[in-house]
């Protein structure tokens, strides 16, 4: 029983990280109907920038905030410069451009920072917190906490601000929104900026666990895809629930299903994606999209 | 009145003349195409006697890639099903050959069609559920497949030799031909490439090809015209996987070694880059794309270890902006510009 609870708790912790990246994917999907294959690499790149700042002696939380701002501006610029020209192109063109972005970011990071793994500090104390017989890693708890804070902020932003309303409107019905005076194209850019920010959070939370290297996001991204698929690509709270579910499932399956262990973890994520897409393509919380003939 | 009639007649005459000119140009293009093809084949046959060793191996790889790219292009370019995971089928083909030779001592000649058959079945089976996945979701599922492949290969250690991989020996030329191993492999690959390209040309040019393209352009209209969408789409997936599997088998023979980490996500992205740069929905594009993905990284490697990928990425994005039909589309455009008859002055278009 204790093992079970222990596994669930650590599953929730990694799930929190998947949730942040999944949240980023969902943000972009909602704003632009695009799945951003470069999301993980954008997060990785932001984390490297954070590492550079820390290396230059900037205190952690200042670095954290600065990185979020840089990531926001970076995401905005990427949308304006790289994605905008293919905004109305077929899906294939957009997928290809985002794959192009993925390899560019990956190789530029390798070029600048080399492929050697770097340690990345955690802002939370290193000694674990013990409640009863169950041990919580302070970093894990912190990661969950930060994810929840971000989700609440996001909810407040979309629910109670005019800008949030405008973004939702632009995503749902671009033509009517434009007639109402909303600058739809800029709303999309804003969506990319926000997504890059969540990605940066995910990157800085995961780097202390997996170490910093240009390929660190490969595995995380497949889990984030799984999380977004499980929760539904159209629902931000769904992405968070999906992330936690994927994290817990990954840990439980790894512990209790003997032939899977840790070696087939990525395959578990793949199986989850395919099963959800087949059984319930809109995910647990997503709305079904009806196409008009 | 008379004047107007005269003008109309002149315009009509000019139009007829232009149509004839265009037909002429197309026919000339056809002759030129056949000429270029014969020349290219002649050069391809002469290559192994002018260069040796590593260079020749690189050209063997070019043809291997060309087969894989053609397979992916049938699926993504012609049929519109986005796959970012074709490296997985490449891996299945390569491992089929490697395991058959290593474990059961089967003659390598048999392993190539077997790899194709197995991939045909696997692709068809993967294509069945993929039917329900529209564009983006299919891209997602195949991307995840590509990410998971190395892990799966390492897991079945008993068959695949785990992360150590399997070492093979290069096949010798049969019938006492006086060819080195590299030369024989080159000719074998070239022959398979020619056969598969002719097959693909025949598949895509007729009724089947039109159905495949119709599904891409408007699947509802295609269905309404009596095309069995789901059957076509899953068969195309199977055929595409078979081409890629055969390419994988040939590459396993040429490299004489397979290991899980060479079939990572970047292999799949390389293949995608190849069809985009060569030209989506073109047959000749597969050759241009193969030349690109084989030689550009080699040159770029001199700049930095990371440079090939940066260049791939930049080319991918630029291609989408300025030449969405890749090198093949660009060449066709140049040819049309050059041979288009001049438009007579004063004609109303």
Image (cartoon, grey):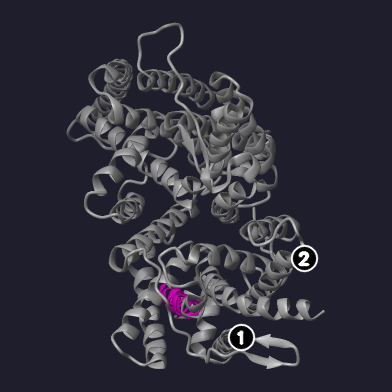
> Label 2 near label 1: C-beta < 8 Å?
no
Res A59 seen here:
yes
> Residue A234's spot in the image, x, y percent?
62, 70
Point 47% across, 23% down: residue:
B201
Residue A222's spot in the image, x, y percent? 57, 62
Quarter of the image that includes the C terminus of chain B: top left
Q: Tell me where residue A117 sits by quadrant.
A: bottom left
- Which is nearer the eye, A86 or A28? A28
Indicate the position of residue B264 as horizontal and vertical percent values. Answer: 49, 50
Count residues near mark 2 (Cα–Cα under 10 Å), then give few for <14, some for 14-19, many for 20+. few
User: What residue appears at the point 60 percent right and 21 percent down from the top-left corner?
Assistant: B106
Per the image, is A160 magenta? no
Which label is found at residue A256? 2
Secondary structure type for disc 2 = helix
Mark found first going from the N terminus, 1 or 2: 1
- Indicate the quadrant containing the N terminus of chain B: top left, top right, bottom left or bottom right: top left
Pointer 2 indicates a residue of which chain? Answer: A
Position of residue A17 relative to residue B98, above or below, is below
């Amino acid at each position: 029983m204790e093992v079970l609870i222990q596994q669930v708790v650590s599953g929730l912790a990694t799930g929190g990280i998947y949730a942040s990246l999944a949240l980023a994917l969902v943000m972009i999907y909602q704003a632009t109907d695009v799945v951003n294959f470069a999301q993980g690499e954008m997060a990785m790149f932001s984390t490297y920038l954070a590492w550079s700042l820390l290396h230059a002696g900037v205190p952690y939380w200042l670095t954290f905030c600065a990185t979020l701002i840089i990531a926001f501006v970076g995401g905005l610029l990427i949308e304006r410069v790289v994605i905008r020209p293919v905004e109305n192109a077929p899906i294939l063109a957009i997928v290809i451009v985002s794959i192009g972005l993925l390899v560019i970011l990956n190789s530029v990071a390798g070029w600048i920072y080399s492929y050697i793994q770097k340690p990345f500090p955690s802002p939370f104390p290193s000694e674990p917190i013990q409640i009863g017989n169950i041990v919580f890693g302070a970093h894990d708890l912190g990661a969950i906490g930060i994810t929840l804070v971000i989700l609440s902020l996001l909810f407040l932003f979309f629910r109670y601000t005019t800008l949030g309303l405008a973004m939702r409107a632009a995503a749902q019905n671009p033509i009517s929104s434009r007639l109402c005076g909303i600058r739809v194209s800029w709303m999309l850019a804003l969506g990319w900026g926000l997504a890059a920010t969540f990605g940066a959070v995910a990157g800085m939370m995961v780097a202390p666990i997996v170490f910093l290297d240009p390929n660190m996001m490969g595995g995380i991204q497949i889990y984030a895809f799984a999380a977004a698929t499980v929760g539904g690509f159209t629902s931000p709270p769904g992405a968070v629930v999906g992330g936690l579910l994927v994290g817990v499932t990954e840990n439980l399956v790894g512990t209790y299903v003997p032939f899977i262990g840790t070696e087939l973890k990525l395959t578990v994520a793949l199986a989850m994606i395919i099963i959800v897409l087949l059984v319930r393509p809109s995910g647990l919380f997503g709305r079904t999209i009806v196409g008009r003939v | 009145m008379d004047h107007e009639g005269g003008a109309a007649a002149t315009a009509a005459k000019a139009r007829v003349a232009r149509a004839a000119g265009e037909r002429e140009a197309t026919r000339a293009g056809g002759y030129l195409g056949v000429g270029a093809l014969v020349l290219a084949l002649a050069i391809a046959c002469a290559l192994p006697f002018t260069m040796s060793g590593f260079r020749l191996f690189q050209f063997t790889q070019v043809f291997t890639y060309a087969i894989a790219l053609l397979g992916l292009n049938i699926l993504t370019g012609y049929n519109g099903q986005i796959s970012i995971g074709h490296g997985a089928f490449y891996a299945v083909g390569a491992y089929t050959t490697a395991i058959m030779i290593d474990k059961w001592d089967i003659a390598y000649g048999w392993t190539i069609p077997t790899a194709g058959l197995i991939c045909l079945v696997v692709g068809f089976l993967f294509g069945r559920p993929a039917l329900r996945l529209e564009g983006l979701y299919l891209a997602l599922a195949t991307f995840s497949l590509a990410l998971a492949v190395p892990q799966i290969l390492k897991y079945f250690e008993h068959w695949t030799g785990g992360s150590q991989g399997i070492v093979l020996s290069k096949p010798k030329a049969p019938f006492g031909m006086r060819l080195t191993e590299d030369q024989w492999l080159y000719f074998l690959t070239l022959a398979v490439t020619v056969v598969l390209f002719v097959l693909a040309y025949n598949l895509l040019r007729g009724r089947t090809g039109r159905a495949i393209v119709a599904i891409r352009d408007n699947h509802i209209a295609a269905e309404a015209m009596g095309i069995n969408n789901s059957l076509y789409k899953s068969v195309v997936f199977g055929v595409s996987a078979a081409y890629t599997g055969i390419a994988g088998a040939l590459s396993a023979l040429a490299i004489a070694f397979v290991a899980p980490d060479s079939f990572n996500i970047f292999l799949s992205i390389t293949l995608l880059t190849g069809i985009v740069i060569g030209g989506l929905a073109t047959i000749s594009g597969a050759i241009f794309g193969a030349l690109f993905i084989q030689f550009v990284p080699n040159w770029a490697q001199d700049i930095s270890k990371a440079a090939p990928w940066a260049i791939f990425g930049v080319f991918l994005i630029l291609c989408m902006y300025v030449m969405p039909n890749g090198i093949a589309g660009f060449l066709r455009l140049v040819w049309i510009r050059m041979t288009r008859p001049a438009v007579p002055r004063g004609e109303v278009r």
